[in-house]
Image (cartoon, rainbow, N blue to C red):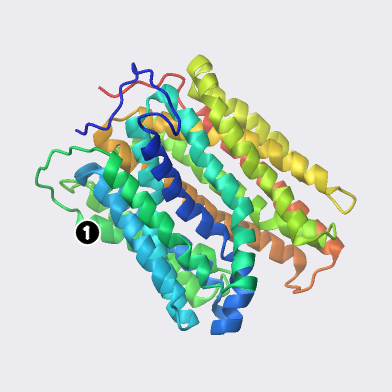
Amino acid sequence: MTSTTSSDADVRPVGFRSDRGPILIALMLSTSLVALDSTIIATAVPSVVDSLGGFTSFPWLFSIYLLAQAVSVPIYGRFADLYGRKPIIFLGIGLFLLGSILCGFAWSMPALIAFRAVQGLGAGAVQPIAMTIAGDIYTVAERARVQGYLASVWAISAVVGPTLGGVFSEWISWRWIFFVNIPFCLLAGWLLARNLKEKVERTPHVIDVRGALLLTVGCALLILGLLEGGEAWAWNSLPSLVVLIVGPLMLIGFVLVERTAAEPILPLWVLRRRLLAATSATTFLVGAVLLGLTSYVPTYVQTALGTGPLTAGFALATLTLGWPIAASLSGRLYLRIGFRNTALIGSVLVVAGAALTATLGLGSSVWQVGLYCFVVGLGMGLVASPSLIAAQSSVGWTDRGVVTGTNMFARSVGSAVGVALFGAIANASLGGSDNPTAQAMSTAAHQVFLVGAVLTVLMGLAVAFIPKRIDAPA
């Protein structure tokens, strides 16, 4: 047990000036590391390639980061339950700091890709453990407002990240997109060390090495196959077949091992409970839908509507602006009508917004795109936050890390599936053309958005399986 857990009966201020304000700031700073790094490098790619070469390898800067982050999340979540949150988030911040410094001094594209993997391993601890700490120190009534604070970091990063990356690349050096992380890491670590008080009962634990290895390698192969299929190799090629067959086989082996493990790295009850299965499925589809919009809205706006990058960024930014607004307000709803009903309302908004994006064409305006994305963002805020909080609220401190980690992992896998699915749809529509016409891009985007709308309906069905009543842990 830990002293950081807050009782639901407590009514205390939430915000920067409250007694937990320094911890909230530290969690936001920690989250900003992951959020900024997801967007800041995109505009710096040309400068990086000019400096280091390796144009054909640069997609790995994104893939290896996502891969390392995704496969490590469930393991960090379980370790946080066994050994406490502080050592795990400090490990994550330390790895992210080390990776950032190494990336800034990278001398070649292979070196930069390897150091991005170190960053990804750090990010795999930072994001879920920050969410877990928020679940520890804030009550159910308070968590929605806190989720709004944390979601706002992503909204700000979506706007600031690409701009900052462009400024560093053009006026200073692309290396500063990594060096800028150093003060954030140090400040976040200092605030957590100074303000987060945690007392964990030290007992001997049996580390589930076999389970951790099978889960990590199996997930790595599966996600790698989804990310690189149709890109680095053809779907029906030998590398693709190997990773997409061996990966699932290792995950089957993982399930068999976990059934007899003394302290499983991912307890199988996490997959069997209706609430946790439904919220993980919901989050999986959230990741897939978001990938489709964030990947193809800017391209559609620039190519089909003939605008510049800044205008395209505005159209997408409305999605990330709607999310924290709805997330911060969701608490008032779920305290009155429950988690499931709140998420169902959000699902209706997401389905409506996604269906509207499927109507976009050559004659559409940027304002339409922005409005439709804003509706999707509002809906996502009412789906994602209540789903996560419902999952966290159903377990005690000793299981909250693995539950949060599983939820975050489901979203990462959903994003990888989205990469494969939407990429295949777009490539099939464009016929492999490197310079598509406005009409061709409009048609491809329409098909992507249409499939995205179908996925939002499936997301709504997953939400419907969330139980009406959620019992608090004993």
Q: Where is residue 7 in the image (x, y as percent from the top left)?
A: 30, 22
Q: Which of 225 and 340 is in front in this view?
A: 340
In what quadrant of the picture does the C terminus appear? Answer: top left
Quarter of the rendering containing residue 285:
top right
Can residue 16 be seen here? The reply is yes
Does residue 471 sit above or below 160 in this rendering?
above
Q: Position of residue 178 (x, y in %)?
A: 48, 67
Q: Total of numbered circles in the picture? A: 1
In the image as oriented, which residue stretches furthest toward the left? 204
Kind of residue indicated by mark 1: Arg
Q: Left or right: where does residue 83 sit relative to residue 55?
A: left
In what quadrant of the picture does the N terminus appear? Answer: top left
Q: Which residue is drawn at 46% across and 35% down?
A: 279
Does residue 403 sit above or below 124 in this rendering?
above
Q: Name the residue under label 1.
A: 210
In the image as oriented, which residue stretches furthest toward the right? 363
Q: Residue at x 59, y 57 (%)?
A: 161
Does residue 216 sit above or below 368 in this rendering?
below
Q: Position of residue 216 (x, y in %)?
A: 33, 60
Q: Left or right: where does residue 215 sit relative to residue 319?
A: left
Q: Left or right: where does residue 411 sit relative to residue 248?
A: right
Quarter of the rendering containing residue 22:
top left
Q: Which residue is drawn at 24% across and 37% down?
A: 197
Q: Which of 24 and 314 is in front in this view?
A: 24
Q: Which of 417 and 255 is in front in this view?
A: 417
Quarter of the rendering containing residue 309:
bottom right
